[in-house]
Image (cartoon, rainbow, N blue to C red):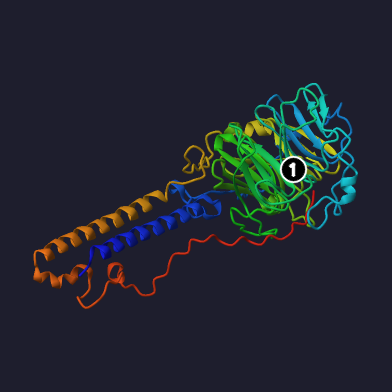
Amino acid sequence: MYSLDTIFKVLVYSLFVISIAELNLKAEGEHVRDPRFLTKQYSNVGNQSQPMLGSFTSTKIEEGFSEDQDWLKGLPALGQVSGVTVDANGLVYIFHRGDRVWGSQTFDDNERLQQNERQRGPISNYTIIVHDPATKTTVLRWGQNLFYMPHGITVDKDDNVWLTDVGLHQVFKFSALKTNPKIAELTLGESFVPGKDSVHFCKPTSTAVTPWGDFFVADGYCNARIVKFDKTGVKLLEWGRSDNQQGLSQPSEYSLLIPHALVIAEDREVVCTADREHGRVICFNWHNGTYSFKLTATSIMGPRLFSVSYSPVEGGIFAVVNGPVSYQARGQRVGGFIFSAKSGQVIFRFGGNLMNPHDVSISSDGKTIYACELDPYTVRKYDSNQLFSAFFSTNATTTTVIPIVHHAVVKESIQTNSSILPAVLITASALLFAGVLLVAALIYSKARRRGCGHCKSNGWMLGRNSAEGFKLGHFLGQHQGFQKVNTGEESEEEEGEVTPFA
């Protein structure tokens, strides 16, 4: 019958099968960490479907903010204004391009800044203006001889200033401003070199910073991804892919077509991006990048959405600005809009005089909005009016709150523990099977040494007759047509070029 050597080989093979099973499960676990594979997994968390917001049907939307036309007094001359933000003290930070204009010949076919643009050197103007709207005075000017094509600006809770330059393909962090800084505290990306890896960007557009210091980069015009870093600049994860098809009626949750701006909604634990050419705001869990919800109202805003900002007042409000398009449907116009985070509906307009808005920022108390323009070169200020205050007084108890979706996260890790249990069960079952087999073999061997002749018929233990040699198929069963589960990653989608600029 079976020698101890044969039994030992069977046990070794069993352990080999266990190892393969665990490796397959581990590979599947790696897929779970990739947000592209999480859409179905989180599509119905807590028996509540993921909300698709913003299907507004009202025929009239009021202007909830009025422009303050005097606030610009004292501001120096500006170039194309690409970014604006307001800090916790109400100071306004303006990022502009001085004498540079982003046109169709600014970059070559490989997304590199043209040689003639590089030869001009960095912008000699002060590219960052810090303005106090209360006193209508400029507090600080800086940023000369540092940037080539400014884009996004963010101020975090510690007043650090984060900037993106699409010409340099870089992201910068400057410490809280007390003087005119010349050197960034943190620089990510290689100057003038576009790319898509842990140390390169391609025209990054914006940043957003968590309360604990981790930050996100929208990358941007070429790569259509959002990248998360820890506070030291070490990459943690990324998500997003390009479909390169403007105007899709239902683009997927992780399909981005120029993620143009980022904002943190701290009370909802999400990071949101203005998905520009899909005309929507789409929000993701700030720990692991899984989809949370989206805001869209293309019937009144049009197919493009350039920027988004957030205030936690009244259950949360999102301020957004759209942009001009080659065609304008009836009822659509360039300007700003306010979404209620409670209902997902557009509740107000603002900025009826905006022409080419590029960025927007709302104060933390929700009372003031700033919107910058590429042409004309200006920044506009809007203050909430009585209609805005009256709306929330009337609707304070009548609006359904959109649920915050919490995903399973342990110590802010993007790993999941869901793959551990199947591995444990498979391992335990296989070890038990091997143990039973070993005991049976020992009993048989002992009985045979005692001269147990009737044991010759004990082939039933392994499903074989005495004439057959050892076959592993008798252990595992003879299943025809069995195919191994494919755990290989999906192929990357081919990304086409994105031609819109600014």
Circle 1: is it few (<14), some (14-19), or many (20+) Cα within 10 Å? many
Q: Is residue 365 above or below residue 168?
A: above
Residue placed at 75% from the left, 46% from the top? 169
The spot of residue 23 in percent (x, y) is 44, 56
Residue 71, visible in the rendered structure: no
What x and y, as percent, mark residue 56? 62, 49
Q: Is residue 25 above or below residue 143?
A: below
Residue at image x 44%, y 64%? 485
Name the side, left or right, on which 144 lies relative to 176.
right
Seen as rendered, the residue at the extreme bottom is 467
Residue 451 percent location from the top left of the image: 9, 67
Determine whether, in the image, residue 148 is placed left or right of residue 199.
Answer: right
Q: Amino acid at mark 1?
A: Gln
* Left or right of 298, for residue 454: left
Residue 198 in the figure: left or right of residue 202: left
**Quick one: SS at disc 1?**
strand
State the quadrant of the N terminus: bottom left
**On the image, numbered disc 1 is attached to which residue?**
170
Give the vertical position of 251 relative to 233 (above or below). Answer: below
Question: 211 or 192: nearer the eye?
Answer: 192
Return the residue nearer the eye: 261 or 470: 470
Near-viewer residue (470 or 299): 470
Picture quadrant of residue 101: top right
Q: Is residue 196 visible?
A: yes
Q: Position of residue 396 (x, y in %)?
A: 55, 33
